Image (cartoon, helix red, strand yellow):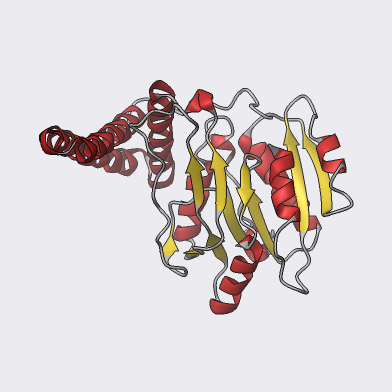
Amino acid sequence: MLSRLLETIADMDNPEGIPLCVVVIENGPVAPARDVVASFRNRLDIRYFREKRTGLVHARNAAIERSLETGAEWIGFLDDDERVSPVWLRAMCEAMERFPAARAFAGPVRLHNPAGATRWFPPPKKFNIRTGQPLWDITTGNLLLKRELLDRDGLGMRFDMAYNLSGGEDTDLALRLRRAGVKILWVQDARCDEDILPKNAGFRAKTALSIHYMHNFGRVNIRLYGAVSGRLLNAFLVVKWTFHAIAYLLAGGISGIFSRQKGQALIARGIQRACMGIGHFRSLYRGLDSHYVTVDGH
């Protein structure tokens, strides 16, 4: 997967005069990516580092430190299971020119299900947001931050070690940026694509992952807003998502009598809202888990 990502980076339509340095952080006890990186040295200014301490936050914070060493004014985050659009960097640079006061940008990650994937969790359709619109519910799979947000002489932002093995570190960072007054602006054309692995495309896997993500979201609320206020917020979200789930399931059951496709779409939304409610409910009494204790690399 890393090779595919680097191939798309090497083939990008880069604006003239914009230097690009790629920093690869390999996480875990083994190092299969070293040879992959070496094969791109004649096509990219690329640097390889190994972070032996297992965990998402160890890897992401190592990426920040190594990227700051390059002297870059902007630092982007991509995941190794993605492919970048040929115009990704050009779109980001155009957004910088259009919004010169901005310090953070994010773009869409379009998910692609494999054949045989469950029909109840279709890929999200978050692709018609206008460029320049502020958002906070972003991931580090397609994020660009100005150096001053990460430099120790600036805000010195880092991913929180509390989420090292659980995930949720990107949501936490986005919310802390928002609290610091930093707007993350959307860049519609800076797209990445990600293929869902078959093992993660079934109903059981999708359900478990959806609950897990919302559980993390709930724990982020508790950590940021305090034990009482955070839990009150999560309790409200449990009620909200439960109500939405019931409404969608009922509407889907009725609509399915007349249109199978429309009924199925509404029921799918109901299932997704139910998972969101379950995840937030779990966050009321259960701490963060160790979902990423095993490195799942390719």
Q: Could you say where residue 42 lies in the image, as x and y percent from the top left?
A: 89, 52
On the rendered structure, is 292 left or right of 180? right
| Residue 9: % across, % down | 71, 53
Left or right of 193 in this view: 222: left
Residue at the spot 43% in from the left edge and 46% down from the top edge: 224
Residue 38, image x and y in percent? Answer: 87, 42
Q: Residue at x 40, y 62 (%)?
A: 129
Q: Which one is in front, 236 or 189?
A: 189
Q: Is residue 131 visible?
A: yes
Count the marks.
0
Is residue 197 found left or right of 68 in the rendered image?
Answer: left
Towards the viewer: 129 or 158: 129
Is residue 140 in sight in this rendering? no
In the picture, residue 151 is in which quadrant? bottom right
Q: Is residue 67 above or below residue 113?
A: below
The quarter of the rendered structure image containing the C terminus is top right
Residue 92 is situated, as x and y percent measured from the top left of the image, at 60, 66
In-image side of 193 versus 243 (left or right) = right
Q: Is residue 188 above or below residue 210?
A: below
> As rendered, which of 212 and 188 lies closer to the eye?
188
- In which quadrant of the rendered image does the N terminus lie? top right
Residue 245 occupies which quadrant of the picture? top left
- 21 w.r.t. 275: above or below: below
